[in-house]
Image (tube, rainbow, N blue to C red):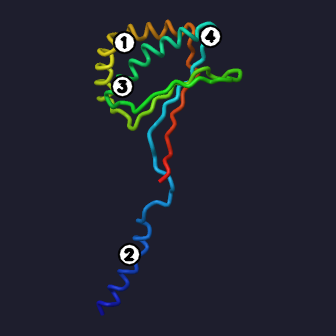
Amino acid sequence: MLAPVALAAATLTVPQVALAQDSEWPMTSGEYVDVAGISIDDGHGLDYAKFLAATWRKGQEFAKSQGWITGYEVMYNVHPRKGEPDVYLLTRFVKWATPEEEEARGKVYRAHMAMTESQMQAASAGRAEYRHVQGSMLLQVGKFK
């Protein structure tokens, strides 16, 4: 009498085992890539390149050394069509910071850059005279299994 009950119970569990198998999806999620599209007014390419090579790079290298980001790149749009950005700034990272981590990072970052938030905002406003953020995208790398 127990044998039929056990057999019935076993058949009920078989479909569940099939559902618990690994995903067939051939890719896994990789790091995030934040892409900012920047346009630069004529005659200010060198000004912006100097900012990127000094201040922006200093901040990115610090963030990388802290493990906040995994890498960064500057990419030039060699043949931009009308309305397209001249420069793309890429920042790669693996995970999002919590609100508490963001606060702590901001404090350490400002100390490293030796600037207050007001000074950073003023510097950004100065660059805004010739540098225009056209938009940004957040991409995620798809890695083949």
* Alpha carbon distance from label 4 to label 1: 26 Å
Would you name the residue on which mark 3 appears?
A: 63
What residue is shown at x 50% (from left), y 45% (from top)?
142
* Alpha carbon distance from label 1 to label 3: 17 Å
Task: Give the camera-side residue of 76 and 137.
Answer: 76
* Alpha carbon distance from label 4 to label 3: 28 Å
Residue type at the position of mark 1? Glu
Task: Give the camera-side residue of 123 and 12.
Answer: 123
- Helix, strand or loop at label 4? It is loop
Cβ–Cβ below 8 Å for labels 4 and 1? no
* Alpha carbon distance from label 2 to label 1: 59 Å
Q: Earlier in the sequence, mark 4 or mark 3?
A: 4
Q: Does residue 139 appear to the left or right of 118 in the view shown?
A: right
Mark 1: few/some/many CA within 10 Å (<14, 14-19, 20+) = few
Would you name the residue on which mark 4 appears?
A: 41
Q: Closer to us: mark 2 or mark 1?
A: 1
Q: Position of residue 116 (x, y in %)?
A: 34, 10
Q: Earlier in the sequence, mark 1 or mark 3?
A: 3
Q: Position of residue 30 (x, y in %)?
A: 45, 43
Q: Position of residue 106 (x, y in %)?
A: 33, 21
Would you name the residue on which mark 2 appears?
A: 13
Residue type at the position of mark 2? Thr
Would you name the residue on which mark 1 appears?
A: 117
Please determine whether, in this image, residue 1 is positioned above or below residue 19: below
Cβ–Cβ below 8 Å for labels 2 and 1? no
Q: Earlier in the sequence, mark 4 or mark 1?
A: 4
* Alpha carbon distance from label 3 to label 2: 50 Å
Residue type at the position of mark 3? Ala
Mark 3: few/some/many CA within 10 Å (<14, 14-19, 20+) = some
Q: Earlier in the sequence, mark 4 or mark 2?
A: 2
Q: Closer to us: mark 4 or mark 1?
A: 4
